[in-house]
Image (cartoon, helix red, strand yellow):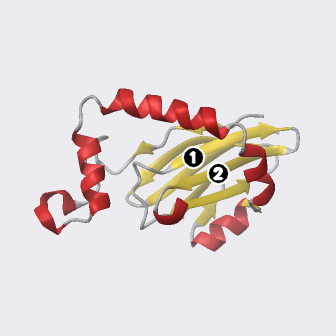
Amino acid sequence: MAWRRVEIGISDGVEEGESASPSSSLGLDISASESHSQFLADSSNISEVSREHGDFLNHIGVIPESSKMASSEILPVGDLVAYLGGSVNGDFMEIPMPSADRRDVVLEVMEGELGSLARIMSPGSFGGVLRTFRLPSGSIISGATWNGHTLGLSLENHS
């Protein structure tokens, strides 16, 4: 069982590489984090460095992954959505993430004998946020999109 990354599309008209916040034009009135994000978005050769960085992190993350999973709480999807103030409507769920820089949010899934798990990682101060949750029996995530600062997940039933 290995985690597989799910690409998150953008449905609100902000093109990839564009800043999702107006702060990029504020000069010295932006935070270090916003400045760093803007720098990365404006760098044309950063994609290769980013890919190699991701490969490196995937390589070093293989060993401790089992201990991370053992110590992190796996929530049922309904509990996760309720905890984060989201909603579930049939085969679609919305998870608000107002403080997250959506370019840094990672969604991963893992299918196993006991069902499908998903996790949302949002880097930030002190290691960021990691939420792991169990999808409904027989369900998989068939798509993920941003609408503003709300993450939408489409589910598909395979049972």
Q: Which mark is residue 95?
A: none
Marks 2/1: CA–CA distance: 6 Å
Residue 33 at x, y percent in the picture: 32, 59
Asked whether the viewer can see residue 135, the reply is no
Compare residues 31 and 93 and report the one nearer the observer.
Answer: 31
Which type of secondary structure does the marked residue at label 2 adopt? strand
> Dot 1 surroundings within 10 Å: few (below 14), some, or many (20 or more)?
many
Residue 130 at x, y percent in the picture: 61, 58
Read off the residue under disc 2: 119
Residue 132 at x, y percent in the picture: 69, 56
Image quadrant for the N terminus?
A: top right
Which type of secondary structure does the marked residue at label 1 adopt? strand
Residue at the (28%, 52%) spot, across then down: 36
Residue at the (30%, 51%) spot, across then down: 37
Compare residues 103 and 62 and report the one nearer the observer.
Answer: 62
For residue 75, side relative to residue 130 (left or right): right
Name the kind of residue labelled 1 in the image.
Answer: Leu
For residue 62, side relative to residue 21 (left or right): right
For the image, the number of numbered tags is 2
Callout 2–callout 1 Cβ contact below 8 Å = yes
Name the kind of residue labelled 2 in the image.
Answer: Arg
For residue 64, side relative to residue 153 (left or right): right
Residue 6 at x, y percent in the picture: 56, 39
For residue 13, side relative to residue 67 (left or right): left
Compare residues 61 and 6 and report the one nearer the observer.
Answer: 61
Image quadrant for the C terminus?
A: top right
Asked whether the viewer can see residue 35, the reply is yes
Compare residues 47 and 96 and report the one nearer the observer.
Answer: 47
Q: Which mark is residue 107?
A: 1
Residue at the (13%, 58%) spot, across then down: 25
